[in-house]
Image (spheres, rainbow, N blue to C red):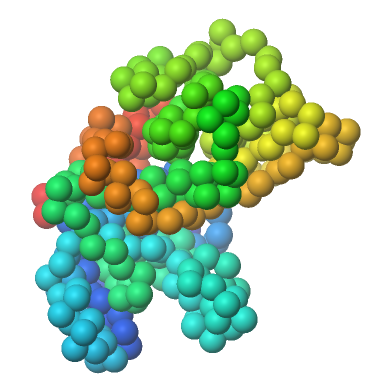
């Protein structure tokens, strides 16, 4: 089967169809989303080799031999999305937590020692799966993973309605964060460089501002989602003393940064990565968030290289890959 494969360089590569082992599910990929992390992997982040892609919606076609009859009844032929971190199941973290995000032995779908979803089929443990509600389309469900990552900000911060929040970065993650935070935050502004992307945010009911027009502020919370090495420096300059900076970007670059203001202003810096799938799916099911307007283009697997080129266009928001095309 064809795949979008990275091995020092990006290529279209024929690979064998995977076989479900243990308690894994073989999932037919219906749609997959291209993320900034995929672009960073191609720049050397995580030193990854394999099939790229971790955002998907698909249908369970087969289950591994260790799956129970209850698993078969619950998952076979169901439309699903899946959490991307796969834990070992026996370390202290796995035994104490219901998620595998910080298992020291974890593999990560399309990111670390596990083939991803830019292929007709992928594998995930059944415990990682979530059934997609019938009212949520594939073009919405494919956003579940990045929407969950944005939801993690809410889980971590417990924002007050009157908290002043700035989001720097009008890319995919910044727009997702804005869509989530606008549900509970009255004073929210998304700052970015691209008028077209800011218009999409404005259509979601988010207050926006061009970076070129932005005047320095002192916000309670600053979300750094620029994907650039100087994003943290910009966040530090615009958060109030004893405020909080949330870092959402993963960047394969080094940066010289003066950390003294973090100490002097007593700033809390919070790393934020993956998040909860259940509220993300529920928000789409209830019609609170519709991410479909973020879709800029859909490509077949055979045009995977063009899909990656398109995703680097500054006016592009979300590129999808459809293995059926």
Foreground residue, 317 or 42? Answer: 317
Q: Is residue 124 left or right of residue 89?
A: left
Instruction: Tally the numbered discs.
Output: 0
Figure check: 125 above or below 57: below
Quadrant into which the N terminus falls: bottom left
Q: Position of residue 37 (x, y in %)?
A: 47, 49
Q: Residue furthest top?
A: 213
Figure check: 211 above or below 321: above
Q: Is residue 67 left or right of residue 227?
A: left
Foreground residue, 95 or 236? Answer: 95
Figure check: 265 above or below 2: above
- Residue drawn 35% across the image and 56% down it: 278
Q: Is residue 12 visible?
A: no
Q: Residue furthest front?
A: 161
Q: Quadrant of residue 105?
A: bottom right
- Residue drawn 22% across the image and 57% down it: 132
- Residue drawn 23% across the image and 63% down it: 131
Q: Position of residue 148 (x, y in %)?
A: 41, 50
- Residue drawn 48% across the image and 69% down it: 99
Q: Position of residue 67 (x, y in %)?
A: 26, 87
Q: Quadrant of residue 240?
A: top right
Q: Position of residue 211 (x, y in %)?
A: 55, 15
Q: Is residue 160 visible?
A: yes
Q: Quadrant of residue 64?
A: bottom left
Q: Is residue 182 left or right of residue 118?
A: right
């Amino acid at each position: 089967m064809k795949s979008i494969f990275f091995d020092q360089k990006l290529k279209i590569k024929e690979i064998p169809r995977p076989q479900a082992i243990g308690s894994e599910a073989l999932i037919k990929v219906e749609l997959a989303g291209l993320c900034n992390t995929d672009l960073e992997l191609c720049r050397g982040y995580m030193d990854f080799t394999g099939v790229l892609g971790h955002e998907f919606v698909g249908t369970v076609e087969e289950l591994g031999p260790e799956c129970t009859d209850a698993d078969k009844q619950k998952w076979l032929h169901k439309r699903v999305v899946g959490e991307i971190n796969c834990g070992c199941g026996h370390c202290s973290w796995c035994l104490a937590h219901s998620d595998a995000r910080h298992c020291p032995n974890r593999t990560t779908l399309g990111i670390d020692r596990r083939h991803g979803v830019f292929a007709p089929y992928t594998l995930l443990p059944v415990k990682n799966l979530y059934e997609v509600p019938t009212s949520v389309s594939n073009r919405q469900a494919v956003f579940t993973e990045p929407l969950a990552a944005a939801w993690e900000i809410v889980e971590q911060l417990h924002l007050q309605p009157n908290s002043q929040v700035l989001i720097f970065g009008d890319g995919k993650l910044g727009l997702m964060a804005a869509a989530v935070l606008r549900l509970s935050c009255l004073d929210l502004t998304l700052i970015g460089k691209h008028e077209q992307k800011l218009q999409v945010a404005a259509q979601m009911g988010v207050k926006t501002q061009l970076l070129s027009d932005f005047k320095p502020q002192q916000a309670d919370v600053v979300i750094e989602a620029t994907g650039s090495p100087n994003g943290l420096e910009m966040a530090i300059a615009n958060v109030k003393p004893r405020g909080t900076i949330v870092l959402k970007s993963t960047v394969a670059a080094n940066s010289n940064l003066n950390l003294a203001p973090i100490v002097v202003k007593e700033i809390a810096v919070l790393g934020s990565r993956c998040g909860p799938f259940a509220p993300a799916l529920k928000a789409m099911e209830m019609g609170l968030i519709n991410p479909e307007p973020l879709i800029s283009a859909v490509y077949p697997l055979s045009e995977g290289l063009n899909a990656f080129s398109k995703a680097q266009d500054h006016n592009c928001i979300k590129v999808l890959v459809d293995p059926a095309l």
